[in-house]
Image (cartoon, rainbow, N blue to C red):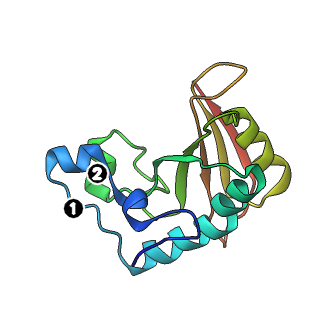
Amino acid sequence: MKNISKYISYQEATTSQTAVRKGINNEPGDNELLAMQLLGIRVFDVVRDHFKTPLRVSSFYRSPILNKAVGGAPFSQHVKGQAIDIQGTGKVTNKMIFDYIKENLDFTQLIWEYGTDKNPAWVHVSYDKDNLKKQILKIG
């Protein structure tokens, strides 16, 4: 598989420095791949098209072992391929990404992660087609 979606390569979605360093297999299964494709198409690609500039994927799929190694939440949607952490590039701030998703897209959970009151360090967004509850949280 070359791409998860229009703008996310398989490599970008599954690469982890921690996995490489610790020799952890971070290959998603078929269910996780389907969830990743849905999230990529319904959220990431829409945001990317809106801002017309590349965005950084700082974390996408995490195998259960990798999730534990990075200190992820025990029931993290990253393990299911349903969550992605995004950062803006150029003039697109993380707050702009957060606000756009909040105001325009369906999602399961949207988290303003760390950073400041003016701009999160990154934006966590999850998409579970069976649970689009639009929960908004702030961590840090």
Residue 126 image point, x, y percent: 60, 56
Q: Quadrant of the N terminus?
A: bottom left
Q: Secondary structure at mark 1?
A: loop
Residue drawn at x 60%, y 49% is: 54
Residue 91 image point, x, y percent: 70, 33
**Disc 2 marks which amino acid?**
Leu
Residue 83 image point, x, y percent: 53, 56
Q: Quadrant of the C terminus?
A: top right
**What number is the disc on residue 25?**
1
Q: Nearer the viewer, residue 10 or 127?
A: 10
Q: Is residue 1 left or right of residue 65?
A: right
Residue drawn at x 57%, y 26% is: 114
Determine crowd level at label 2: few under 14, some 14-19, many 20+ residues with C-alpha closer than 10 A.
many
Q: Secondary structure at mark 2?
A: helix
Q: For marks 1 and 2, give the CA distance.
A: 8 Å
**Disc 1 marks which amino acid?**
Asn
Q: Is residue 139 left or right of residue 92?
A: left
Q: Which residue is mark 2?
A: 66
